Image (cartoon, rainbow, N blue to C red):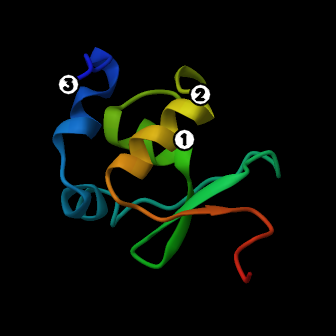
Amino acid sequence: MPKVNPKFEKFVNMSKEEIEEYLKDFKPYFESKRHKYFVNINGIMFPIVQVVALVCGLSPLEISSGQAYSLVKRKGFEIIERGKEEE
């Protein structure tokens, strides 16, 4: 098993259901239209970087979209690309 970056351990050690429960009281924030990938959590679209940042207690600036994509995908979340929601 690959070594996990310590800053992502909390996310890696939580189940998909625990992540959904943890985020139930959070709302997504959008700085701009720069976000490309989203995940639907509890019926709300969150940028994938924000999901990892909130769970790990990090600034979104500490996480690349590639890192977030990989972490979120491994948890079994469906990742939605901006503009492809209805395809």
In three-dimensional space, the C-alpha distance between marks 2 and 3, rounded to whole angstroms, equals: 21 Å
Q: Quick one: SS at disc 1?
A: helix
Residue at the image point whose x is 42% and y is 59% from the top: 26
| Front disc: 2 or 3 | 3
User: Badge 3 local density, few (<14 within 10 Å), some, or many (20+)?
Assistant: few
Judging by the rendered image, the residue that carries numbered circle 3 is 1
Report the amino acid beneath label 2. Answer: Ser
Q: Nearer the viewer, residue 63 or 58?
A: 63
Figure quadrant of the C terminus: bottom right
Disc marking residue 64: 2
Residue at the image point whose x is 65% and y is 53% from the top: 37
**Image quadrant assignment for residue 61:** top right
Report the amino acid beneath label 1. Answer: Val
Q: Quick one: SS at disc 3?
A: loop
- Residue 59 in the image: above or below residue 37: above
Q: Percent x, y for residue 83? A: 80, 68
Q: Are marks 2 and 1 in contact (CB under 8 Å)?
A: yes
Report the amino acid beneath label 3. Answer: Met
Q: Percent x, y for residue 16? A: 25, 58
Q: Nearer the viewer, residue 43 or 74?
A: 74
Figure quadrant of the N terminus: top left
**Image quadrant assignment for residue 9:** top left
User: Badge 2 local density, few (<14 within 10 Å), some, or many (20+)?
Assistant: few
Residue at the image point whose x is 51% and y is 72% from the top: 44
**Image quadrant assignment for residue 60:** top right
Judging by the rendered image, the residue that carries numbered circle 1 is 49
